[in-house]
Amino acid sequence: MPKRHGENTSLGDVLKEFIEANRLQSGLDKISVKDAWHSVMGEAISKYTTSVKLERDTLYVGLSSSVLREELSYGKEKIVKLLNDAMEKDLIKKIVLR
């Protein structure tokens, strides 16, 4: 039987409970990491991004430019930190550029 909420329960609390009960957080994280990539990296890099996929704690990024892939490989640790800061969670431990 579902829990009954009092009059003072916020919509945010109800949504959090729904997400936890239905185990939707990992799917939401996969979507939010794509949004974070495009906002953190900017329009210039987003233009060359073909795919962004989060599996466990590894972010796989497909790039259409080998030169850009090489340049970004030097700053992987900084990119991880920026993305985790943007999402306000430590989801990403490693980035694989393809």
Image (cartoon, grey):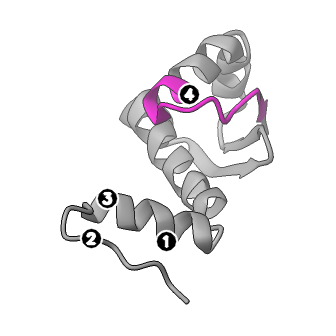
Is label 4 or label 1 in front? 1
Tell me where the magenta segment starts and ends, as one range: 83-96
> Could you tell me residue 90's position as x and y percent?
63, 29
Under mark 1, the amino acid is: Phe
Q: Earlier in the sequence, mark 4 or mark 3?
A: 3
Is label 2 or label 4 in front? 2
Q: Secondary structure at mark 2?
A: loop
Q: From the viewer's perspective, is 90 left or right of 47?
A: right
Under mark 4, the amino acid is: Asn
Is label 4 or label 3 in front? 3
Q: Return the residue at label 3.
A: 12
Mark 2 and mark 3 in contact? Answer it, CB < 8 Å.
no
Q: CA distance from mark 1 to mark 3?
A: 10 Å
Magenta span includes 37: no
User: Quadrant location of residue 15?
Assistant: bottom left
Q: Quadrant of the N terminus?
A: bottom right
22 relative to 16, above or below: below
> Could you tell me residue 61's position as x and y percent?
69, 42
Q: Return the residue at label 2.
A: 6
Is label 2 or label 3 in front? 2
Q: From the viewer's perspective, is 81 left or right of 44?
A: right
Front-most of residues 23 and 14: 14
Q: From the viewer's perspective, is 26 left or right of 14?
A: right
Q: Return the residue at label 4.
A: 84
Q: From the viewer's perspective, is 51 left or right of 39?
A: right
Is label 2 or label 1 in front? 2
Under mark 3, the amino acid is: Gly
